[in-house]
Amino acid sequence: MTTTVQEKSDSWRGVASEDQEELTDRVSVLLRARSRRLLGDLLRPYKRRIALLVAIIVVSNAAGLSIPYLVSVGIDAGIPPITNGSGAGILVTVVAVILVAAVTQALTRQAFLRLMGAVGQSILLTLRRRVFDHFQRLSLSFHEQYTSGRVISRLTSDIEAIAELVQSGFDALVKAVLTLVGTAVLLLVLDVHLGLVALIPIPLLLLFTKWFQRQSAVVYRRTRETVALVIVHFVESMIGIRAVQAFRREPRNQEIFEQLNDDYRDANARSMVLGATFMTGVKLIGNMTIGAVLLYGGYLALHGEVSPGVLAGFMLYLRSFYEPMQEISQFYNTLQSAGAALEKLSGVLEEEPAVPEPREPQALPHGRARGKVRFDGVEFAYVKEMPILPRLDLTIPAGQSVALVGATGAGKTTLAKLISRFYDPTEGRVLLDGVDLRRLDEPTLRQAVVMVTQENFLFNGTVADNIRFGKPDATDRQVREAAKAIGAHEFIAGLPQGYDTEVGKHGGRMSAGQRQLVAFARAFLADPAVLILDEATSSLDVPSERLVQRALRTILAERTALIIAHRLSTVEIADRVLVMDRGRIVEDGPPAQLIASAGRFAGLHRAWLESLSS
């Protein structure tokens, strides 16, 4: 069972407050480090283009920062001589240079936005691809505890938060930093005394910014958590809409959604209040500084110690000096939201599959699987100290069909999951043709072993698409031959568009029997050496079951099969029956032999015959 750092933090509520704070700080450091690793991995392939982006924005900012200085020169050097009938040339030159700077800034800005957009979309494409691929490779145990709503939240709202950072946050940060540094330098170049007065509030701004940074980290992490809960509840309610409506669950679900929605609103409101406090605080400090500089600068100008042009340039620079502080506050909003999203995504991406790929895969002895399955001293438990299989030794020869019978919880499905390697045994080995499944690479194993379950999940698309699901390169002829072999061709041909008919959501446009036949055709076309049928006929009515029974005899021929079924009509077609109880095999033999005995299977068979006659 996998446990994320975020989930572990929920168990700390009973810890002493001092220890809890220390643990929380440690986890925060771990989460930030993990997020930085992920961000570094995403940015690393684009180092050169990012360096070019920085160069472009430096040129753009330099051009923009030059304008107030040029205005200062124009006023001092160009305007006074005009009143005496000279100096027009200087003023025209300055204006021309200002126009060149403005055009340079516009062109470089356009180049930056175009290149940043391309880089940003490439990063997001890589991230979405990586998240989707990783979710597919994670083991079944992970998906059994990680809800579909949380999966959707990772791939939608979390990536959207990172998209905002990549597409606009980087621009805002670099531009703001360059503007702040460049303006501070130019203020001191224009006049040291006025510059020092203008920079007096900087320590206060740094403290204010540090406070905002700490507060926003908590607030935006809470925002990401609450939006994830909203998505989880919505997705689960829609996926289970039949049960919701059948049990008149709508009012209660609405109550839960309202509470989660309120929590999300409150979290967003707190983030907005925090952002507003920071932005208005920065603006207040900036306006007070401008007033102080104007008052002091006016005094110096009256005494001839500062020229009007320098004072005008100072005012322009001060306006551009405090505006980036507001941009930085907005950047922090984006950064904290994206940071919380990165924490969640990095947590998922650093999850290791409970069923890992072998570092040095081993080939099957005959190149292609023949289907001999062996359980060698296998023990397994979903939860420690609660074994499902205490110890199991079992051999299934290649080509033999084996039916598993037993009460719920006897270990039948666990056996199937171990053969499919959805889980690995806690002790012992499961072997295919003498090779430990842990030594087989994923493609070899999936080609050799296929499971058909009672859910017989069909994906959006056509009937043909669903049949070739396990063999995407299959031709239309091969698809039709597979359908004919298991007896599905007749009903498929009768559909409105035949094999090109859309199956609808989860195959909802078909009956249970038809969906099962399509699932069998899919398995037949994949042609595995080992086929597992997990309650494949449990949801069918009698006519559908008879239709599927004929298909079963075709699909089971000349391949190893493991059949889990409560209906003994399905069990009867097997070569061998294993009766399980609490993870142990208590009866083993051909169906006819077990029926003739006085054991458990014989009792089950008699009860089944009585139910048919009643």
Image (cartoon, rainbow, N blue to C red):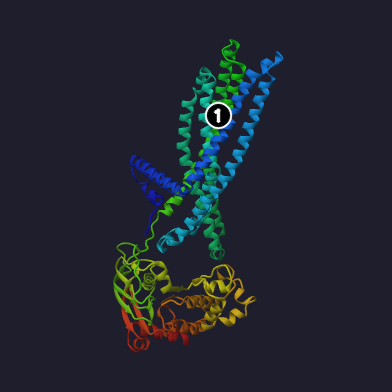
User: Is 393 in front, or is 559?
Assistant: 559
Q: Callout 1: helix, strand or loop?
A: helix
Residue located at (52% from left, 73% from top): 468
- Counting every numbered tag in the picture gives 1
Q: Outermost residue toward the top?
A: 303
Residue located at (40% from left, 52% from top): 7
Q: From what the image shows, is residue 47 above or below residue 460?
A: above
**Residue identified by numbered label 1:** 322
User: Is 149 in front, or is 184?
Assistant: 184
For residue 459, what is the image quadrant?
bottom right
Viewer can see residue 270 = no
Horizontal side of 335 relative to 20 (left or right) equals right
| Residue 398 spot, x, y in % from top left | 36, 81
Amino acid type of the residue that numbered disc 1 sits on in the rendered structure:
Tyr
Q: Outermost residue toward the right?
A: 85
Residue located at (46% from left, 77% from top): 527
User: Is 312 in front, or is 432?
Assistant: 312
| Residue 188 spot, x, y in % from top left | 51, 22
For the residue carrying disc 1, how many other residues have a C-alpha within 10 Å: few (<14), some (14-19), or many (20+)? many
Quadrant the N terminus occupies:
bottom left
Horizontal side of 469 relative to 354 (left or right) equals right
Viewer can see residue 346 = yes
| Residue 206 spot, x, y in % from top left | 47, 30
Residue located at (32% from left, 88% from top): 597
Q: From what the image shows, is residue 182 above or below residue 12?
A: above
For residue 600, what is the image quadrant?
bottom left
| Residue 355 spot, x, y in % from top left | 37, 63
User: Is 451 in front, or is 163?
Assistant: 163
